[in-house]
Amino acid sequence: RFFNDEFVDLVNQYDLLIIGGGNFFDLYIEESISGTTLNISKEILRKIKIPVLFFGIGCDPYKGATEDIFCRFRKFLDNLIMSNQFFISVRNDGSINNIRNYIGEKYLKYIHHVPDGGFFTYISKKDLFHPEIPDKGRIIAINVAGDMPDIRFTPKLDSSYLNYEEFIKEFANFLNDLLSEEMDISLIFVPHIYKDLEIISKVLNNLRDDYRRKRITVAPYLHGYEAHDYIFNIYRKSNLAMGMRFHTNVCSIALNTPTIALSTRYFKIRDLYQELELQDRIIDVSKRNFQLKLNKIIKDTFNKEEEIRKIYTCLNKKLRKDMELFCSKLNEWLREYF
């Protein structure tokens, strides 16, 4: 999208502009006035005549922010907070702490905190047939992320960290051992974007052939509304979901499925779990010898599955209350215009 006069003419035909849902406050784009994907100048902002809601946006510096980018983002926020025309909210993924630590405490009084929309995911067709899911045994749904390998795995910082290829071999070896120890477990790999198919293929290439043939399946690569129900119903039907992707974790928690965050040097889901006070559900799989910790937390999860589901149920009730509180503040702002 280009934030130019044509964009202004388009949005001014409407009553409200909503920007959000995504990680649009990622701080890494050198070519952007704001340092983010929202490359909106002060002049363009002034030409927008309708109220603008920045809804549940993620803000993080993990792709390589510089002090110059921090300065640009501060100026962008300064332009927004000058007018009550703009309502700014960030999601509960560590964004508040990132703004506090990297941008400045003073901005927090202008920024609202809202649970990510994925916590309110709803599956309308729960009777879907899944050939990926076996009739018997325990199911682990797994998401491994194939994008940003140089950010997720950075061994040059410290020899105790794995590179991308080393992780693939270590993770596959771990899964081989797990399947040999636990004969009733089946695995379903779940891709979210096309790059996930690549890393799934590489992990499969390092697994035992008899496991690939009989105890491992891969969910289809889908998109759209119908795909939402199909893919997230796999997470709902699993005994455990473990993954690198933000919404693998968010939506599984929303569905009360026990989770394990497969955290890496890209700290987004680590920050999410810390905000949710679920630090004990995080494993840093970019570190060497992660296997012992991961094996222990998987076994503990199966032993305490119902207890964890109850914890998630209570957590989801709290998140709904948090959303209600946010909506009341949003309502107050909207009443000024409608």
Image: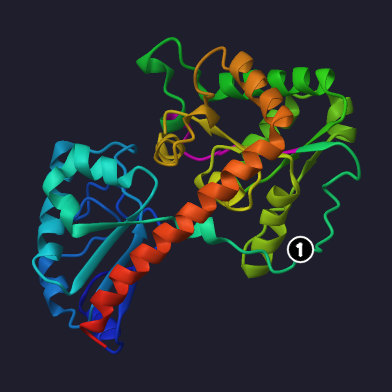
Q: Is residue 151 above or below residue 16?
A: above
Visible in this render: residue 267? yes
Residue 28 appears anywhere in the view: no
Q: Which residues are magenta?
A: 140-150
Residue sitting at 80 percent across and 41 percent down? 217
Q: Give whichever of 61, 56 is nearer the camera.
A: 56
Residue nearest the observer in this picture, 320 or 263: 320
Horizontal and vertical percent for residue 327?
36, 69
The amino acid at mark 1 is Lys
Identify the image quadrant of residue 19. bottom left
Residue 156 falls left or right of residue 252: left
Applied colour scheme:
rainbow
Element on which disc 1 rests: loop
| Depth check, front residue: 23 or 94 | 94
Task: From the top left corner, tell me how far across and down residue 295 is, in percent.
Answer: 67, 20
Dividing the picture into quarters, in which one does residue 6 lie?
bottom left
Residue projecting furthest to the top? 159
At which x and y percent is residue 290?
57, 17
Q: Callout 1: few (<14), some (14-19), or many (20+) C-alpha neighbours within 10 Å?
A: some
Q: How many marks?
A: 1
Decide if residue 128 is on the left or right side of residue 135.
left
The image quadrant that residue 116 belongs to is bottom left
- Quarter of the image with the N terminus is bottom left
Q: Give the residue at x 25% y 38%.
A: 65
Is 1 within the magenta? no
The C terminus sits in image quarter: bottom left
Q: Which residue is mark 1?
A: 126
Q: Nearer the viewer, residue 31 or 332?
A: 332
Residue at the image point whose x is 25% and y is 62% from the top: 88
| Image x and y of residue 301, in percent | 67, 30
